[in-house]
Amino acid sequence: MNIPLLNEVAAFIWQEADMLDNELYQDWLRLWSGDGLYIVPIDPKATDFANTLNYAYDNAHMRELRVQRLTGGESISTSPEPRTVRMVSRFRVAAEDGDTVTVRCAQFLTDFRKENAHQYTANLIYTLRRHADSFLIDRKVVRLINSDDVLQTIGYIL
């Protein structure tokens, strides 16, 4: 087990969670590679995300639009904007190939909006590419454990 690498990827993913919880969306957008994909599948067993229905299948342009909706105040699904807290844990480097690292971890997200709190639990899979002294996200897959059930208030970034 490569403990320094594990610590490095955990710190990067914790930084991303902090950016999202603190609404630092422009900083979050800069964490991505130009061709990176943000994916939230509906089918818990899906592997061909391009040819299945997803809650999100965002390239760079769609991530920009998602941030605009979140910050523009015009989207009913994000007004008022939810307050969120993400806890990310159980990091495991699943693969390492030169400059690319695949990381699996768990996320517990609580949002509070309109006097209601909601809990979302997900398994996350990141494909990270080394960039300078950190990483860029090439792919992030958010596998909600209840993705095929009725979901509420997921108009924000998981």
Image: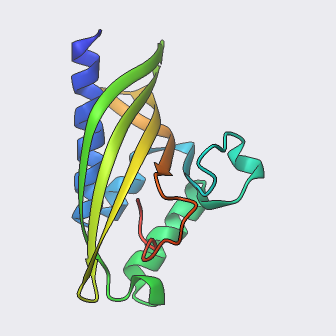
- Looking at the picture, tell me which residue is in the foreground, 130 or 85: 85
Residue farthest toward the right in the current orientation of the protein: 51
Horizontal placement of 66 versus 78: left or right? right
Q: Residue at x 63, y 43 (%)?
A: 45
Q: Residue at x 39, y 46 (%)?
A: 31
- Identify the image quadrant of residue 26: bottom left
In the image, residue 8 sits, relative to residue 37, either above or below, namely: above
Residue farthest toward the top in the current orientation of the protein: 1
- Identify the image quadrant of residue 92: top left
Horizontal placement of 128 versus 85: left or right? right
Q: Residue at x 37, y 32 (%)?
A: 135
Query: Residue 121: horizontal and vertical position, in percent?
Result: 36, 54
Query: Residue 112: horizontal and vertical position, in percent?
Result: 25, 77
Horizontal placement of 45 versus 100: left or right? right
Classify the position of the N terminus by image quarter.
top left
Horizontal placement of 103 versus 112: left or right? right
Query: Residue 43: horizontal and vertical position, in percent?
Result: 64, 53
In the image, residue 2 sits, relative to residue 119, either above or below, namely: above
| Residue 47 in sight from this viewpoint | yes
| Residue 75 in sight from this viewpoint | no
Classify the position of the C terminus by image quarter.
bottom left
Q: Residue at x 23, y 88 (%)?
A: 115
Query: Residue 106: horizontal and vertical position, in percent?
Result: 34, 42
- Identify the image quadrant of residue 9: top left
- Looking at the picture, tell me which residue is in the foreground, 99 or 76: 76
- Looking at the picture, tell me which residue is in the foreground, 150 or 40: 150
Image colouring: rainbow
In the image, residue 119 sits, relative to residue 98, either above or below, namely: below
Q: How many marks?
A: 0
